[in-house]
Amino acid sequence: MRVDGTEVLLTPKEFQLLAVLAEAPGQVVNRQVVFDAVWDSHAYGHTKTLDVHVASLRRKLGHPEWIETIRNVGLRLGPTT
């Protein structure tokens, strides 16, 4: 994928995470829904795993404001303009 004309390499999990959020732009997606969509349903993980991947994705995109954390609710993909 490209951001501001620069190629950005994402891990498969980062890509899946971005895809889940992109399916509902501007809408808050519950953290558990995101986790279940990106990680295997049999996987046992801590939500810190999600936080680490979100932080990495924000860094790679270069626009951390694009992925907004809604405290105690979930994540939202915001405007990318």
Image: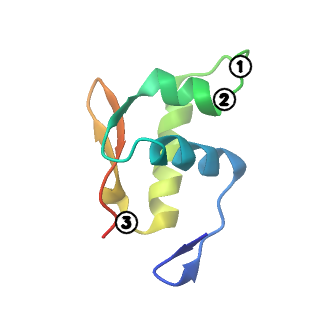
Colour convention of the picture: rainbow
Query: What crowding class fits label 1: few (fewer than 14 Cα within 10 Å), some (14-19), or many (20 or more)?
Result: few
Q: Secondary structure at mark 3?
A: loop
**Camera-side residue: 30 or 53?**
30
Q: CA distance from mark 1 to mark 2?
A: 6 Å
Of all residues shown, which one is farthest toward the left?
71
Q: CA distance from mark 1 to mark 3?
A: 30 Å
Which residue is the site of mark 3? 63
Q: Is residue 20 above or below residue 65?
A: above
- Determine whether label 3 and label 2 are within 8 Å by CB: no
Task: Of the two numbered discs 3 and 2 on the same chain, state the one appearing first in sequence.
Answer: 2
Query: What crowding class fits label 2: few (fewer than 14 Cα within 10 Å), some (14-19), or many (20 or more)?
Result: some
Q: Residue at x 43, y 69 (%)?
A: 62
Q: Is residue 47 above or below residue 5?
A: above
Query: What crowding class fits label 3: few (fewer than 14 Cα within 10 Å), some (14-19), or many (20 or more)?
Result: few
Quadrant of the frame with the N terminus:
bottom right
Which residue is the site of mark 2? 39
Q: Amino acid at mark 1?
A: Ala
**Camera-side residue: 61 or 59?**
61
Quadrant of the image occupied by residue 80: bottom left
Q: Amino acid at mark 3?
A: His
- Measured as percent of width and height from the top left, residue 33 is found at 49, 24
Q: Secondary structure at mark 1?
A: loop
Specify whether 64 is left or right of 16.
Answer: left
What label sits on residue 25 in the rendered view? none
- Measured as percent of width and height from the top left, residue 32 is found at 48, 21
